[in-house]
Amino acid sequence: MTSTDLTTAAGTSSVFIPGPATPYQGDIARYWDHEARPVNLRLGDVDGLYHHHYGIGDIDHAALGDTADSAYEKKLIAELHRLESAQAELLLQHLGHIERDDTLVDAGCGRGGSMVMAHQRFGCKVEGVTLSAKQADFANRRAEELGIGDHVRARVCNMLSTPFETGQAAGSWNNESSMYVDLQDLFAEHSRVLAVGGRYVTITGCWNPRYGQPSKWVSQINAHFECNIHSRREYLRAMADNRLVPQAVIDLTPETLPYWELRATSSLVTGIEEAFIESYKDGSFQYVLIAADRV
Ligand SMILES: C[S@@+](CC[C@H](N)C(=O)[O-])C[C@H]1O[C@@H](n2cnc3c(N)ncnc32)[C@H](O)[C@@H]1O
Ligand SMILES: CC(C)=CCC/C(C)=C/COP(=O)(O)OP(=O)(O)O
Ligand SMILES: [Mg+2]
């Protein structure tokens, strides 16, 4: 097994970070260690919440103003960011009632934007895991800067095998991070970590069984992000197999299209906009929220 043994300033070895569980996870760790797309960093710079997920809701055309205005690009970035934060708010809302002394788990926490929002909303502890040491450092630095480092912590860890105690979490979630793992393994781990009566929420892109098989657009998104998008059916089946009973299944596809159409007009395009827009429109791909109770 490969590993990283971190050494403190005093020269003593203090933190043991296991290496990736599989070669694929090594690829994904490298991918996120090297990610620095302006569409993510410039949006995060708006208010210090750094997201790696997409947006939902109507465009505020009054706030955007005239495209000829010299401040238009700045306003567009703020608008895209507002829609991404609205997405995270919706996810957190579906966690239900969370107490200040509860613990939440963010599986695949990225740069930690959703974790900060969760702490600000509930006042609770939030534990995040990511494969990327750069992302974990970034998230922990932001938490320290905000003075909430005692409540919000990211660590380098495989979400399929976490250090959390059985039944420790009142809630847990995957925000656009479940397309990197086997769903049976994923929900077995959430089911272990969640208390009975705890709530799991995911927002994800999934292919639509009604289309038949993953469309060429879905394959393009997989290739772009080195991920493996699951079908809606797979989510529901794997939850049922792991004591997670859906309380809400919401098709957010109509809510996310305005985000993509606005993003496609910006200078921050990455080339993947057409695949999202076309697959959402031809019905082969859906943006869904699933909230489930651990029974
Ligand atoms: C698209 S980003 C989403 C980040 C975050 N949830 C957000 O909404 O900003 C995907 C994240 O999943 C993480 N990830 C992928 N596979 C993972 C695994 N097996 N264990 C832990 N994290 C993983 C990546 O490291 C990355 O942080
Ligand atoms: C809905 C699906 C299929 C998501 C795949 C996972 C993913 C890469 C999400 C967005 O990350 P990002 O914010 O880093 O991407 P981008 O740079 O495109 O904004
Ligand atoms: Mg992004």
Image: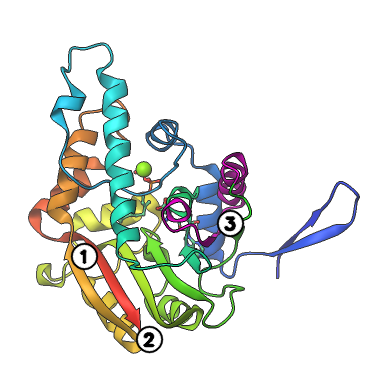
Q: Amino acid at mark 1?
A: Trp
Q: Which residue corresponds to the image point at 47% horizontal and 64% vertical from the top-left?
A: 107
Q: Does 131 appear in magenta?
A: yes
Image mark for residue 207:
1
**Disc 3 from disc 2: Cα separation:** 29 Å
Which is the main secondary structure of the residues drawn in magenta? Answer: helix
- Proximity of marks 1 and 2: CB atoms separated by less than 8 Å: no
Ligand 1 within 8 Å of disc 2? The answer is: no
Residue 186, horizontal then vertical, whole percent = 43, 75
Residue 271 in sight from this viewpoint = no
Ligand 1 within 8 Å of disc 3? The answer is: no
Please provide the residue range marked out in magenta.
Answer: 118-147
| Viewer-side label of 1, 2 | 2
Q: What crowding class fits label 1: few (fewer than 14 Cα within 10 Å), some (14-19), or many (20 or more)?
A: many
Determine the image quadrant of residue 202: bottom left
Q: Which residue corresponds to the image point at 55% horizontal and 67% vertical from the top-left?
A: 158
Determine the image quadrant of residue 265: top left
Question: Would residue 172 be found to the left or right of residue 33 on screen?
Answer: left
Label 3 sits on residue: 151
Quadrant of the snapshot with the N terminus? bottom right
**Disc 1 from disc 2: Cα separation:** 21 Å
Tell which circle, 3 or 1, labels the residue nearer the N-terminal end: 3
Residue 82, horizontal then vertical, whole percent = 30, 38
Q: Which residue corresponds to the image point at 12% horizontal and 52% vertical from the top-left?
A: 254
Question: Would residue 276 be found to the left or right of residue 5 on screen?
Answer: left
Element type where label 3 sits in the image? loop
Determine the image quadrant of residue 144: top right
Label 2 sits on residue: 242
